[in-house]
Image (spheres, helix red, strand yellow):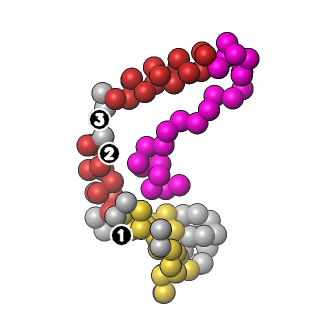
Amino acid sequence: MDTSPRPGLLCPACQVPLVMTERQNIEIDYCPSCRGVWLDRGELDKIIERSAVESPAARPREEAAQDRYRDAARSRGHHGDYGYRRKSWLQEIFD
């Protein structure tokens, strides 16, 4: 992941120079101070296209597996610790 300051581009909220990074071929400008995120023209379209391609049929199956995992953890006495859920590609972009 390459992060580099964008010369001349300031955060509209706090006037700190924006930092550019590229994740999964999507260029993201963000403010290291307030954590605001800005996308170049066309980048939001890429994100929307990718989310449409993601299989909606797989989600209920994943949720059922998560429920079984939680039930098993509760039966072993792990009431507050549910483990980690796999991040979607969209969460990975903004992580």
Residue 14, above or below 72: below
Prevailing secondary structure class for the magenta stretch in the rendered image: loop
Q: Circle 3 is placed at which residue position?
A: 55
Q: Nearer the viewer, residue 48 or 55?
A: 55
Q: Nearer the viewer, residue 77 or 27?
A: 77
For the residues marked 1 and 3, what is the alpha-carbon distance in whole angstroms?
A: 26 Å
Residue 31 placement, left or right of 55 = right
Identify which amino acid the numbered label 2 is placed on: Ser
Q: Circle 3 sits in a helix, a strand or a loop, which is it?
A: loop
Residue shown at 56% from the left, 21% from the top: 69
Residue 70 placement, left or right of 44 = right
Residue shown at 37% from the left, 60% from the top: 24
Q: Circle 1 is placed at which residue position?
A: 40
Q: How many marks?
A: 3
Label 2 packing within 10 angstroms: few (<14), some (14-19), many (20+): some
Q: Circle 2 is placed at which residue position?
A: 51
Residue span colored magenta: 73-95
Residue 13 position within the rendered picture, expressed as x and y whole percent measured from the top left: 57, 70
For the residues marked 2 and 3, what is the alpha-carbon distance in whole angstroms?
A: 9 Å
For the residues marked 2 and 1, what is the alpha-carbon distance in whole angstroms?
A: 18 Å
Residue 12, above or below 87: below
Residue 7 placement, left or right of 56 = right
Whether residue 77 is visible to the viewer of this picture, yes or no, is yes
Mark whose residue sits in front, 2 or 1: 2
Residue 15, above or below 23: below
Question: Which corner quadrant of the image does residue 61 belong to?
Answer: top left
Residue 15 placement, left or right of 57 = right
Q: Circle 2 sits in a helix, a strand or a loop, which is it?
A: helix
Assess whether residue 50 is covered by the magenta stretch.
no
Whether residue 12 is visible to the viewer of this picture, yes or no, is no
